Image (tube, rainbow, N blue to C red):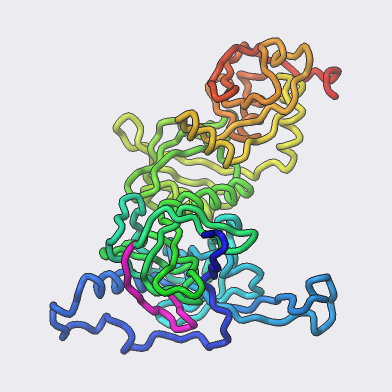
């Protein structure tokens, strides 16, 4: 069976010293080379290679059965040198790579295209998707990879892989797209879905490196090889990478910053970013941002897609005033929003408010559940709150809301997460106890009704 095949993640555990590109390795000195030799492949590599970096470092692993069982003796552990590849996606030094490249690495070291070696820190990771974002410590702008799309790939088209194969940095190989939508089991606990199969040579050390099309646009992240086979390797599609990395950064930012913004946008440059929802009582609502605004700039950074927007928010600190340029009604408007520190007790407070004023016990719906729901219902819901309990006699009970429903919104505001619900219940309009329209999903149907929300918390009704 296919599941019994052996696959290996393309990460090197060699102790070779990092190679640095020499002048003879680089193709910039090509003024005397005939145009016939400067093929599309040469031009594609030349375009993308400056944004490819070498990642290396040591990790401590348990080397004996006793170590696996928890022993702490000197012979229970050993140091392993690892190498992988990364791709610069932001000039400030933000780099995408595979999570397994940096997993448990004590000190992440990165060698740039010009040979400079510096340190990096892990910013965000998604273990199940084997992707990570690291920040390289640099004091100058770095060249970034040209981003393409994996949505229009064709079986048979030429592709190029760049990586640090066996520690030889910037090794370039060429092949074709052999197949699309491959599901690849790596081991008993890890499996990749919807990968690109390629014939370009991928070796240990290539993990996290770019897969390019013939124009030099990045269309995937190289990740795994079939052990014992030739010209069978795999890459994570670029559109999947952009979606996952954007979600990773959004989650990281939400833990640091309170903005109240939710955005929509496509995976490619130029698709734009539109404000989909503004939470009640949030900094975004207070400072004038509205649903439908198209964000074109955050601070000094232009915004073409949701990844740009997420990256622009990474360096923002709580309390900092952030300038936005938005398009509204055909005109560009400049706004300033002051971010806030998320309240530490927001979850417990909103749980109490929801129980006392509406009569519901809620928890966030998992992203995977929302994706399946959207697929089956052909909807685009960004999130929801699962109704885990309903207080007898409460407004929710009187309107027929039951355990198992998914709350989508109240009074025109989305309830994508607990922070959204907190903003709604704390909004001045809602504190007066209005009759508010609500939306729920039940058995893959969207339903609505009107809640008479309690004007203040009924402490006697709390459990």
The image shows residue 146, relative to residue 248, as above or below, that is below
Name above or below for residue 105 compared with residue 148.
below
Magenta stretch, main secondary structure, is strand
Residue 170 painted magenta: yes
The residue sitting at 26% across, 63% down in the picture is 215
Image quadrant containing the C terminus: top right
The residue stretch that appears in magenta: 162-177
Quarter of the image where one finds residue 180: bottom left
x and y percentages locating residue 158 in the rendered image = 28, 65
Image quadrant holding the N terminus, namely bottom right
- Is residue 335 found left or right of 124 in the rendered image? left
3 in the magenta segment: no
Number of disc labels: 0
Q: Residue at x 61, y 25 (%)?
A: 407
Return the residue nearer the eye: 229 or 88.
Answer: 229
Q: Position of residue 109 (x, y in %)?
A: 56, 77
80 lies left or right of 117: right
Residue placed most toward the observer, 201 or 54: 201
**In the rendering, at what x and y percent does residue 230 appear?**
42, 74
Image position of 245 (left or right of 402): left
244 or 352, nearer to the observer = 244
- Classify residue 357 by image quadrant: top right
């Amino acid at each position: 069976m296919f599941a019994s095949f052996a696959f290996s993640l393309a990460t090197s555990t060699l102790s070779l010293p990092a190679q640095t590109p020499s002048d003879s390795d680089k193709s910039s000195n090509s003024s005397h080379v005939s145009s016939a030799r400067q093929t599309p492949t040469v031009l594609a590599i030349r375009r993308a290679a400056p944004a490819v970096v070498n990642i290396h470092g040591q990790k401590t692993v348990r080397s004996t059965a006793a170590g696996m069982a928890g022993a702490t003796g000197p012979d229970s552990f050993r140091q392993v040198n690892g190498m992988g590849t990364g791709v610069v996606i932001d000039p400030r030094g933000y780099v995408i790579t595979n999570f397994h490249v940096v997993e448990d690495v004590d000190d992440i070291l990165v060698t740039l295209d010009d040979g400079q070696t510096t340190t990096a820190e892990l910013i965000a990771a998604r273990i199940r998707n084997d992707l990570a974002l690291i920040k390289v410590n640099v004091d100058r702008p770095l060249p970034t990879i040209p981003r393409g799309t994996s949505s229009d790939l064709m079986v048979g088209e030429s592709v190029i892989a760049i990586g640090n194969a066996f520690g030889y940095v910037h090794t370039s190989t060429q092949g074709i797209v052999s197949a699309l939508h491959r599901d690849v089991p790596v081991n008993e606990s890890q499996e990749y879905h919807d990968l690109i199969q390629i014939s370009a040579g991928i070796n240990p050390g290539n993990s996290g490196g770019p897969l390019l099309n013939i124009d030099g646009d990045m269309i995937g992240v190289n990740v795994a090889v079939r052990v014992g086979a030739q010209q069978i390797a795999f890459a994570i599609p670029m559109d999947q990478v952009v979606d996952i990395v954007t979600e990773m950064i959004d989650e990281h930012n939400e833990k640091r910053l309170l903005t109240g913004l939710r955005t929509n946008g496509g995976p490619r440059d130029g698709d734009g970013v539109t404000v989909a929802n503004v939470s009640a009582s949030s900094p975004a609502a207070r400072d004038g941002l509205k649903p439908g605004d198209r964000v074109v700039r955050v601070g000094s950074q232009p915004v073409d897609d949701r990844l740009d927007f997420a990256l622009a928010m990474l360096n923002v600190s709580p309390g900092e005033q952030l300038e936005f340029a938005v398009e509204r009604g055909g005109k560009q408007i400049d706004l300033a929003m002051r971010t806030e520190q998320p309240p530490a007790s927001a979850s417990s407070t909103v749980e109490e408010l929801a129980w006392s004023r509406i009569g519901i016990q809620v928890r966030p719906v998992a992203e995977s559940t929302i994706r399946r729901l959207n697929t089956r219902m052909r909807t685009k819901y960004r999130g929801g709150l699962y109704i885990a309990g309903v207080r007898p006699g409460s407004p929710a009970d009187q309107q027929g809301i039951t355990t198992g429903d998914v709350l989508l919104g109240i009074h025109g505001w989305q309830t994508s997460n607990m922070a959204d619900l907190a903003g709604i219940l704390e909004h001045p309009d809602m504190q007066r106890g209005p009759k508010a329209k609500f939306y729920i999903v039940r058995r893959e149907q969207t339903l609505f009704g009107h809640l008479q929300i309690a004007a203040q918390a009924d402490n006697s009704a709390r459990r």
